[in-house]
């Protein structure tokens, strides 16, 4: 009778709510140290599965994605490079289109060298623990359609409870002193200090590497 009908309606409503929640947020356990110090091994996190239905991925986003070489596996990392950008990782620095990526959140910088031009609709994704992360520097950029979630709330262990956030990297002109720097063809540079003396004038540096006893700053 009435009691049975109400029970069935309650069960159906509960199932609908469960399915909606499962499509909006999934919980994952972080495995490994590749995202230290942002996320930790054994940490449990709810991920927002709807955000990228509406908004495009941005540099600095921590994302979960299907591993390109085996889509059944789910990986996590941070977006470092965007479609069409030229990225070089050298001497512990990330250079994007000739600009230095300022990553104040890193505790250990990369010891490897890597360079690439990111294809259309692809993203370069790295772990924060650069030397202990199996990421884009090993197997290439990640297609846009493989990115499907971002961390929302950490719920275990208790000391990590709360909204998940990570400082965003910023691009700044790369200044060098007696060392090599990569300059893109879009950058006008001028010497602001010359260690060897002589006249200082505005110059346009062609793409490639420069090495001089001059500190360069973009105009």
Image (tube, rainbow, N blue to C red):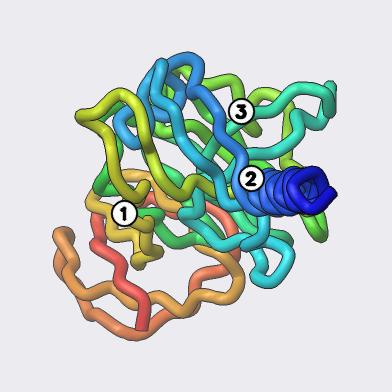
Q: Residue furthest front?
A: 1
What residue is disc 2 on? 124
Residue 92 visible in the picture: no
Q: CA distance from mark 1 to mark 3?
A: 20 Å
What residue is disc 3 on? 135
Q: Residue at x 46, y 79 (%)?
A: 188
Q: Residues within 10 Å of mark 1 (few under 14, many from 20)?
A: few
Q: Does residue 144 appear left or right of residue 92 in this picture?
A: right
Q: Does residue 82 appear left or right of residue 93 in this picture?
A: right
Residue 108 drawn at (x, y percent): 29, 27
Q: Earlier in the sequence, mark 1 or mark 2?
A: 2
Q: Quick one: SS at disc 3?
A: loop
Q: Which quarter of the rendered picture does the C terminus lie within?
A: bottom left
Q: Residue at x 36, y 24 (%)?
A: 40
Q: Residue at x 84, y 28 (%)?
A: 71
Instruction: Report the front residue among 66 and 206.
Output: 66
Q: Quick one: SS at disc 1?
A: loop
Instruction: Report the front residue among 153 and 131.
Output: 153
Q: Residues within 10 Å of mark 3 (few under 14, many from 20)?
A: many
Residue 54 drawn at (x, y percent): 69, 71
Q: Does residue 148 appear left or right of residue 28 in this picture?
A: right
What residue is disc 1 on? 167
Residue 171 drawn at (x, y percent): 40, 64
Instruction: Report the front residue among 9 and 62.
Output: 9
- Whether pointer 1 and pointer 2 mark residues with C-beta atoms closer than 8 Å, the reply is no
Q: Nearer the viewer, mark 1 or mark 2?
A: 1
Q: Residue at x 49, y 45 (%)?
A: 151
């Amino acid at each position: 009778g009435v009691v049975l009908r109400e029970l069935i309606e309650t069960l159906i409503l509960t199932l609908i709510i469960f399915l909606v929640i499962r499509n909006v947020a999934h919980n994952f356990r972080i495995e490994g140290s590749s995202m230290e110090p942002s996320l930790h091994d054994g940490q449990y996190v709810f991920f927002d599965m709807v955000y990228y239905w509406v908004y495009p991925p941005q540099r600095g986003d921590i994302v979960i994605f299907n591993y390109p070489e085996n889509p059944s596996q789910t990986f996590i990392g941070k977006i470092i490079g965007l479609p069409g950008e030229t990225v070089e990782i050298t001497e512990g620095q990330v250079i994007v289109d000739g600009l230095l990526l300022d990553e104040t959140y890193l505790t250990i910088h990369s010891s490897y060298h890597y360079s690439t031009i990111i294809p259309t609709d692809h993203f370069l994704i790295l772990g924060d623990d650069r030397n202990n992360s199996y990421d884009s520097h090993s197997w290439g950029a990640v297609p846009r359609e493989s990115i499907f979630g971002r961390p929302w709330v950490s719920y275990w262990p208790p000391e990590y409870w709360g909204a998940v956030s990570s400082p965003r990297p910023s691009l700044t002109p790369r200044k060098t002193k007696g060392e090599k720097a990569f300059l893109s063809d879009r950058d006008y540079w001028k010497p602001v200090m010359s260690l060897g003396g002589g006249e200082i004038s505005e110059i346009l540096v062609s793409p490639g590497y420069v090495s001089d006893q001059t500190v360069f700053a973009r105009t």
